[in-house]
Amino acid sequence: MTEITGEKKGGCPVVHFDFNKPRPVNDYLRELDQLREIAPIVWNTYGGGFWMFLDDKSVRKALHDPETFSSEATIPTVPDPDWHWIPTMENPPMHKLYRRVLNPPFSPRAIRAREPRLREHAIGIIEGFMDRGHANYVDEFAKAFPTKVFLEILGLPHEHSEQFVAWVETVFGGLGAEDDNAAQAMADAQAAIHQYFVDLLADRKANPREDDFFTSLTQAKIGDRPITDEEFLNMCDVLVLAGLDTVKSQLGYMMYHLANHPDDRARIVAQPEIVPQAVEELLRTYSIVMDGRKVIQDNEFNGCPVRKGEMVMLTIPSATRDEKAYLNSTEVDLDRNDASHLAFAAGPHKCLGSHLARLELAIALEEWHKRIPDYEIVNSEALYETGPQLGLEELHLRWDPKR
Ligand code: HEM
């Protein structure tokens, strides 16, 4: 439970909000909704302490202001990280040069061309278990589908998928953790991912391939000079961390919502054309990324003295439910038709994979509901989520295979 300490920092409320504990599903969103009612900005004493920006306006403003809110540190509890993710931890103007290299394979046109293959993967996975009448949705679909897609887009072997899933889960399990074991496991997993790409880099340099993402990346130019090995490796680390767990987490919440809301589910089945709009609304209501920035210039934000060197959490899962930005903001309304939400952030660091993610989410909903229109949650009592990137640990679904 969040503790409202009654203290003030520069006139702004001080709370203790532990974003690393497993909690019953939707607890985080409920607590963030309550915190936002207290103030748009609070100081959190968790970890070394950091500001939490909770409303749409503050989060949006900070995302567009890298001169005040630097990306050199993006985990609110780690102001001086000993790693450097590219492009995540770069600021303009270098950031733009890296995005220029990474954007092409993730552009709307490049992603659209992949739609048939993505659909095949989704159908193959669903048809693998649909006659059984039950599945562990998180493990069997939400992890499996984005991993297959991701490895294929990047030209990596499918048999490495379990290894990637395990690494990524360990890293996210350690983000912001106060306990030393989780932090050590995170460091080990990061080192293992890094080593995988050290070997891959050597291989692609020795044996360049046609039409291969990593071969092109080894030959990329940053401005007018060749990419360095270190830059290559730091980009690879980010792609793996950003591309897998996010889609898994988002899918978990989407299906959790639809399993519990038969009317919304029935609309997706009867009117599949509303799926892209439903994806936006579910992204908005169940946003997952709680990202950080480091303050590099003193400023006053909503009356709070935000000082150089302090960390800020851009609490997107709260901002997207801000009642000042959206009518009935905490309710899912499949007719809302508004993609201006911050689920993929905004400004220079807006998600590189947003077009891919949107397509994966839409295909997942469409192909699932064509085959399994009605289903229920088996483990409602034991549903837990964790932060700082929100996600359900498990979601067991069952359905009547004869329907
Ligand atoms: C539902 C799924 C996803 C969500 C909700 C999501 C959300 C986000 C958010 C909020 C950011 C901004 C982080 C910041 O400002 O510090 C971001 C950045 C990023 N995302 Fe995603 N993401 C998703 C899927 C993906 C996928 C599939 C990829 C695959 C490549 C990806 C790659 C990236 C990268 C590389 C960045 C860093 C961009 C930069 O710093 O310029 N994301 N994502």
Image (cartoon, helix red, strand yellow):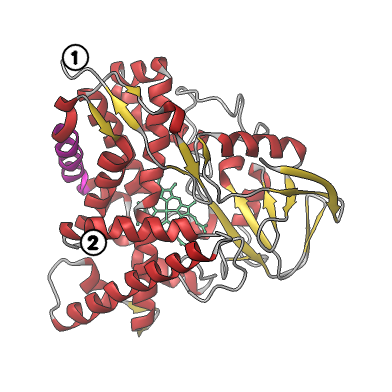
Give the x, y percent position of residue 35.
70, 39
Cβ of mark 2 under 8 A from ligand 1: no
- Asked where in the image residue 138 lies, by quadrant, the reply is top left
Quadrant of the snapshot with the N terminus: top right
- Mark 1 Cα-neighbour bin, 10 Å: few <14, some 14–19, many ≥20: few
Residue 121 painted magenta: yes
Q: Is residue 366 left or right of residue 231?
A: left
Q: Amino acid at mark 1?
A: Arg
Marks 1 and 2 close (CB-CB < 8 Å):
no
The residue tagged 2 is 154
Does 14 sit left or right of 29 as displayed?
right
Question: Which labelled disc corresponds to residue 104?
Answer: none
Compared to 389, does 94 lie above or below?
A: below
Task: Please state which of residues 337 and 209 is positioned toward the viewer in this rendering.
Answer: 209
Q: What segment is highlighted magenta in the picture? A: 113-127
- In the displayed structure, 227 sits above or below 369; it is below
Of the residues shown, which amino acid type is indicated by label 2?
Leu
Which quadrant does ligand 1 occupy?
bottom left
What secondary structure is found at the residue carrying circle 2? Answer: helix
Residue occupying image coordinates x 49% and y 33%? 338
Please name the residue that numbered disc 1 is placed on: 403
Q: Is residue 248 above or below residue 127?
A: below
Magenta stretch: dominant secondary structure: helix
How far from the left and from the top, in percent, is residue 157? 16, 61
